[in-house]
Image: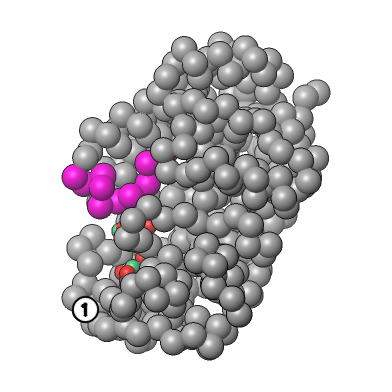
């Protein structure tokens, strides 16, 4: 049996870390990416870490003909991990059609091509955004928590994608899918050879913190300190991107070894621990010794007050745990920022 995995979006943030873990576990990888939110040098970083270069095809998953050609050129794909998607919440509100086209169209093409080419295993990148703000009875959030109406077109595409996968699995008995709902991925590979490359002004907390630490941004804005949380700032489950990447390898292993119990399995991927914005900022200052000027400003529209995972299912069934200490994770993010900005110690 082939051990080649197609990774769409494999030069992106979570994708590149996953490619490293897959290759280190002996998988062959072919990446499909249109470099719309990543760059080709990521392949050098992967090669420097692993000692081998993944195959790379510059293709947009919306381009059915050329995406289809990849399946002809690589006839023995054992499974697919589908990361390729647009992911900026704010942008999705402004350009909903772009998000529906990219995120829904890509998955439809992919599933159709998998079917045509007898590829039966898919791991799909979903998000804890599908749970919205869970009520107190559902915190920490397990996989049985209710799905709530999406707060943005981006969030809606994740829900629609999950539904598409379930419908296609129902119609195609030999299709197996693993849906991974990520909480908040942060940090970078310990080698500092790959990491997050935010485009323009970062929306997410950690890239904004590291850019502020590097002097690129004068001040971090903490969005709200009047939430119903111990220190008033929002709480999230920040998960180390390398731990997250390893969960994908576990998910692929499980499907390829035919161990999945259900045709479609869902796992929450988080640490099980919630941290507030202010806790993250203070811990970052403590472990790096770098000051982060910050001000408290008003709430950000659409923000959820508090959410963190119950990862028990992933811990037990996948035999996986996100257990890298927060201090190490924050340091990895800082080391990556220093690498990007050529800052010496
Ligand atoms: C956001 C998306 C979520 C998506 C995830 C991907 C929203 C509402 N949700 O999650 O759908 O799956 O990114 O990574 O955008 N914060 C600040 N100052 C900043 C930036 C962030 O205080 O400059 C705070 C936010 O208010 C929030 C926390 O930091 O409380 C985390 O924010 P962020 O990193 O954007 O992640 P989410 O909002 O959880």
Would residue 195 appear left or right of 89 to someone viewing this image? right
The stretch in magenta equals 84-94
Q: Nearer the viewer, residue 317 or 212?
A: 212
Query: What x and y, as percent, mark residue 46?
Result: 67, 47
Query: What x and y, as percent, mark residue 2?
Result: 77, 24
- Indicate whether 160 appears above or below 116: below
- Indicate whether 163 appears above or below 193: above
**Quarter of the image containing the C terminus?**
bottom right
The reply to whether residue 300 is visible in this rendering is yes
Q: Quadrant of residue 105?
A: top left
Q: Quadrant of residue 102?
A: top left
Q: Magenta includes 250?
A: no
- Rendered residue at 66%/68% (across/down): 323
- Mark 1 element type: strand
The reply to whether residue 314 is visible in this rendering is no
- Rendered residue at 71%/19% (across/down): 76
Q: Magenta includes 87?
A: yes
- Indicate whether 169 appears above or below 182: above
Residue behind mark 1: 297
Numbered circles on residues, count: 1
Would residue 221 appear left or right of 28 to someone viewing this image? left
Would residue 337 appear left or right of 317 to someone viewing this image? left
**Quarter of the image containing the N terminus?**
top right
- Rendered residue at 22%/38% (across/down): 96
Q: Which of 191 and 95 is in front in this view?
A: 191
Query: What x and y, as percent, mark residue 215?
Result: 39, 76
């Amino acid at each position: 049996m082939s051990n080649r995995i197609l990774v769409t979006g494999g030069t992106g943030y979570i994708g590149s870390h996953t490619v490293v873990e897959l290759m280190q576990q002996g998988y062959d990888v072919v990446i499909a990416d249109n470099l719309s939110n990543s760059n080709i040098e990521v392949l050098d970083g992967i090669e420097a870490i692993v000692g081998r270069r993944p195959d790379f095809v510059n293709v947009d998953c919306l381009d059915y003909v050329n995406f289809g050609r990849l399946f002809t050129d690589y006839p023995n794909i054992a499974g697919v991990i589908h990361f390729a998607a647009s992911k900026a919440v704010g942008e999705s509100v402004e350009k909903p059609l772009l998000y529906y086209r990219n995120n829904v169209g890509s998955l439809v093409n992919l599933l159709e091509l998998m079917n045509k080419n007898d590829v039966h295993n898919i791991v799909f990148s979903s998000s804890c955004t599908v749970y919205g703000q869970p009520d107190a009875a559902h915190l920490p959030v397990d996989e049985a928590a209710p799905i709530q109406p999406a707060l943005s077109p981006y969030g809606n595409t994740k829900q629609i994608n999950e539904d598409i996968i379930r419908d296609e699995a129902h119609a195609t008995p030999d299709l197996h899918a693993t849906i991974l709902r990520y909480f908040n991925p942060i940090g970078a590979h310990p080698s500092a050879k790959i990491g997050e490359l935010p485009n323009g002004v970062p929306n997410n907390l950690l890239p904004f913190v590291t850019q502020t630490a590097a002097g690129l941004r004068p001040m971090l804005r903490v969005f709200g300190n009047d939430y119903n949380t111990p220190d008033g700032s929002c709480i999230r489950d920040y998960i180390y991107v390398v731990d997250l990447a390893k969960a994908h390898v576990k998910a692929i292993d499980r499907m390829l070894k035919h161990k999945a119990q259900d045709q479609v399995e869902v796992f929450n991927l988080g640490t099980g621990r919630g941290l507030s914005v202010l806790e993250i900022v203070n811990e970052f200052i403590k472990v790096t010794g770098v000051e982060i000027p910050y001000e408290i400003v008003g709430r950000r529209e659409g923000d959820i007050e508090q959410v963190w995972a119950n990862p028990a299912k992933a811990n037990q069934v996948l035999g996986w745990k996100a257990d890298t200490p927060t201090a190490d994770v924050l340091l990895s993010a800082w080391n990556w920022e220093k690498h990007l900005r050529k800052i010496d110690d």
